Image: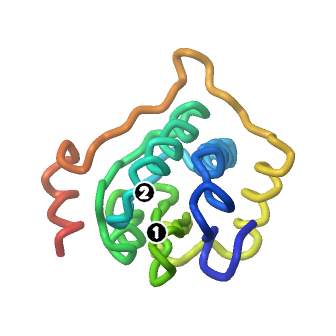
Amino acid sequence: MFGTSGIRGPIAEDVTAETALSVGRALASERYDTVVVGRDPRDSGRMLEKALISGLEECGSDVIRLGQAATPTVARSVGWQEADAGVSITASHNPPNDNGLKLWTPSGQAFDTERRERIATRIETADYELAAWDGIGETTHYEQAPADHRRAICQ
């Protein structure tokens, strides 16, 4: 599932809304309680972002949605926002029909092999911990984040 730089591949083949939903569910089920989400300008990123956020919220994680943001900005924002993880929706230099998901730690480093394997195992076994109706996560849009947090992202 994960390659050297996250999950990447053609939209509607290897990378689907279901893929993003599953990644969101798995992250939240692994107790990443606050997750930063940003995407590159690819059209398919809008769909993947919605699915990812739905999975995160469904299993109780809160989301800080950056919207369109460069991959390094998403990576650094995890620590700046005091979040537990981050997800860049991007296929980097791959063709326009591709997209992907790259996972980040608070230090701005990509998820290591052990973290990726835990997420992949949850997805493969559909081992998700869905939140109760009163435990569903919430999304804060970057524009709604406190001013000191917004300044940190722009530095």
- In the rendered structure, which amino acid carries the disc numbered 2? Gly
Mark drawn on residue 45: 2
Residue 147 position, x and y percent, is 13, 52
> Would you identify the image quadrant in which residue 40 lies?
bottom left
- In this rendering, does residue 87 appear at all? yes
| CA separation in Å, label 2 and label 1 | 7 Å
In the figure, is residue 69 to the left or right of 127? left
- Asked whether disc 2 touches disc 1, contact meaning CB atoms under 8 Å apart, the reply is yes
Q: Residue at left 64%, top 42%?
A: 25
Q: Which residue is mark 1?
A: 90
Q: Residue at left 47%, top 74%?
A: 107
Residue 82 position, x and y percent, is 39, 57
Which badge, 2 or 1, comes first in the chain's sequence?
A: 2
In the figure, is residue 142 to the left or right of 27? left
* Position of 148 relative to 65 (above/below): below
Q: Could you tell me which secondary element the residue under label 2 belongs to? A: helix
Q: Residues within 10 Å of mark 2 (few under 14, many from 20)?
A: many
Q: Residue at left 52%, top 66%?
A: 99
Which of the two residues, 131 or 47, is positioned nearer the viewer here?
Answer: 47
Which of the two residues, 93 or 33, is positioned nearer the viewer here?
Answer: 93
Q: Could you tell me which secondary element the residue under label 1 belongs to? A: loop
- Quarter of the rendering occupied by the N terminus: bottom right
In the figure, is residue 66 to the left or right of 56? left
- In this rendering, does residue 104 appear at all? no
Q: Residues within 10 Å of mark 1 (few under 14, many from 20)?
A: many
* Position of 152 relative to 141 (above/below): below
- Quarter of the rendering occupied by the C terminus: bottom left
- In the rendered structure, which amino acid carries the disc numbered 1? Thr
Q: Residue at left 68%, top 42%?
A: 29
Q: How many marks?
A: 2
Residue 30 position, x and y percent, is 68, 48
